[in-house]
Image (cartoon, rainbow, N blue to C red):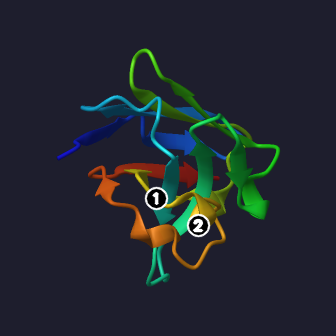
Amino acid sequence: QVELVESGGGSVRSGGSLTLSCGSSAPIGNVKCMGWLRQVAGKERREGVATIEADGSTSYRDSVKGRFTISKDNAKNILYLTMNSLKLEDTGTYYCASDLTPYACYPGSPYVNDFHYWGQGTQVTVSS
């Protein structure tokens, strides 16, 4: 069983920045796919925000491209999401997730909610 623990959420003004961290209890270097998803108000399913494959390849949902960066530190077993130029619509609960088949490893995948392991979520609130 893999435990994922997120941190770094909070409240920020529009245009501000936050960095989320996700510590894993197991090595992440060879994990085929990890990602960040978010649950936003009014949406039934969590939406994919960014994914990263074992080789470091990254993918982003269109609305965060150029503003968010997903990265990982394999030595420390930590996944990051750096969020800049935050907008009101970025408000939500952000979840770290691990272990998804590579062919589904992109935010728009219909299987992006099928990650095997999940963190508990961290709230991000963007205000005007």
Q: Residues within 10 Å of mark 2 (few under 14, many from 20)?
A: some
Outermost residue to the top = 75
Q: Which mark is residue 70?
A: none
Residue type, mark 1 in image: Leu
**Disc 2 on helix, strand or loop?**
helix
The residue pinned by badge 1 equals 100
Q: Which mark is residue 104?
A: 2
**Disc 1 on helix, strand or loop?**
loop
- Say which residue appears at 42% left-offset and 27% top-offset: 78
Residue 127 position within the rendered picture, expressed as x and y whole percent measured from the top left: 58, 52
The answer for how far apart the CA atoms under marks 2 and 1 are is 7 Å
User: What count of labels does the image hold?
Assistant: 2
Residue type, mark 2 in image: Ala
Locate residue 21 relative to residue 102 in the image: left or right. Answer: left
- Say which residue appears at 47% left-offset and 29% top-offset: 29
Outermost residue to the left = 1
Closest to the observer, 75 or 46 = 75
- Say which residue appears at 44% left-offset and 15% top-offset: 75
CB within 8 Å, label 2 to label 1 = yes
Closest to the observer, 14 or 74 = 74
Residue 10 position within the rendered picture, expressed as x and y whole percent measured from the top left: 43, 40
Picture layout, residue 77 above or below residue 126: above
- Say which residue appears at 64% left-offset and 53% top-offset: 128
Residue 71 position within the rendered picture, expressed as x and y whole percent measured from the top left: 60, 32
Picture layout, residue 126 above or below residue 73: below
Residue 31 position within the rendered picture, expressed as x and y whole percent measured from the top left: 45, 41
Locate residue 5 relative to residue 83 in the image: left or right. Answer: left
